[in-house]
Amino acid sequence: MVVVDNASTDGSPQMVRKKFPWVYLIENKSNLGFARGCNIGIRSVKARYYLLLNSDAATMGNALDVMVSFMDANPDIGASGGLILTEDGKTQPSTLVYPNYFNLLFSRASLLSKIPVFRWKMQELRKVPDEITDVPALAGGFLILRNEALQEIGLLDERFFIYLEDIDICRRLQKAGWRVVFNPNARILHSWGASSAKRRAQSFWWHHMSMFKYFQKHYPYLLPINLLLGFGLITHYSLWWLTNTITGWKSYRNNHSKDSPKS
């Protein structure tokens, strides 16, 4: 097992060295992002398969054996992922669709998702299959990749600091003729958002920038539309930031007014 630490400051490297001395620990001097961090780990070892697993996730039961056996039995599969469960037992969306100029309106990050009809459409797009199914893309937090396929298409695209690198590599795999398959028989437990919550505003910004880079990469001939999209993404982020700032300020003011001594 390889653990790539992106310059964390919470003592994670020390914990890994102490509790898991058999793990190959790579300590980056700065936060290089998810894609680049994963690529460093992949390049450090030679294997038939590479399993990408978030730092805030843990495999359940024989999930690793299930994934390896599944890949062995299906040599045409380039990437596979399993069922991701939250700590309260709910299913986390782990199958993804290719973003386009229309379905962005129904993304989980969209402010419009608070409107019932938009929220319903978002849930439909993110619905997880009940059985083994070929899908457009899978979440990078629990993703097994075949070495042979990576040798053909390359590793994760490091222009994506975080977010969208999973959809991008799945798209590239399918374009090269490899299957991308969801297998719910392999499961992990994921503290959803535990990592991004520490830097919520920064993570949201990275998500928006990765989305813009994704459209620039896959639809380069639509530059005018992409520039308009970029303006929309910046506007969306600004509205989100303003809304959360006002909400946080009101909460702070209310809490302090309650704590203030009355004359």
Image: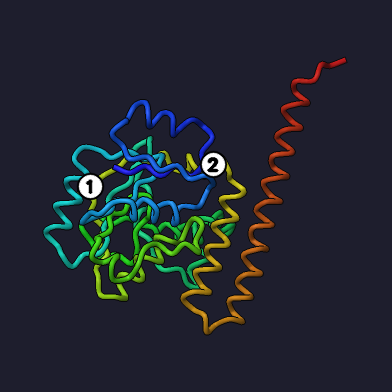
Instruction: Identify which residue is drawn at 34% across, 55% down.
Output: 43
Mark 1 and mark 2 lie on one chain; the one further toward the N terminus is 1
Callout 2 environment at 10 Å: few (<14), some (14 to 19), or many (20+)? few
Q: Is residue 136 above or below residue 45?
A: below
Q: Please, which residue is most extreme toward the right here?
A: 263
Tell which of 90 and 50 is nearer to you: 50
For the point 17% across and 48% down, which residue is it?
66
Amino acid type of the residue that numbered disc 2 sits on in the rendered structure: Ala
Q: Position of residue 23 (x, y in %)?
A: 31, 37
For disc 1, the neighbor class at 10 Å (few under 14, some 14 to 19, many from 20) is many
- In the picture of the structure, the residue carrying the numbered disc 1 is 186
Q: How is the image coloured?
A: rainbow
**Disc 2 designates what residue?**
197
57 lies above or below 218:
above
Q: Foreground: 216 or 243?
A: 216
Residue 186 located left or right of residue 106: left
Name which residue type carries label 1. Ala
The quarter in which the C terminus is drawn is: top right
Could you say whether the residue bearing mark 1 is in a helix, strand or loop?
strand
Residue 66 shows up from this direction:
yes
Q: Is residue 58 left or right of residue 179?
A: right
Measured as percent of width and height from the top left, residue 227 is found at 63, 75
Residue 101 visible within the image: no
**In this view of the protein, which residue sits in the foreground, 186 or 112?**
186
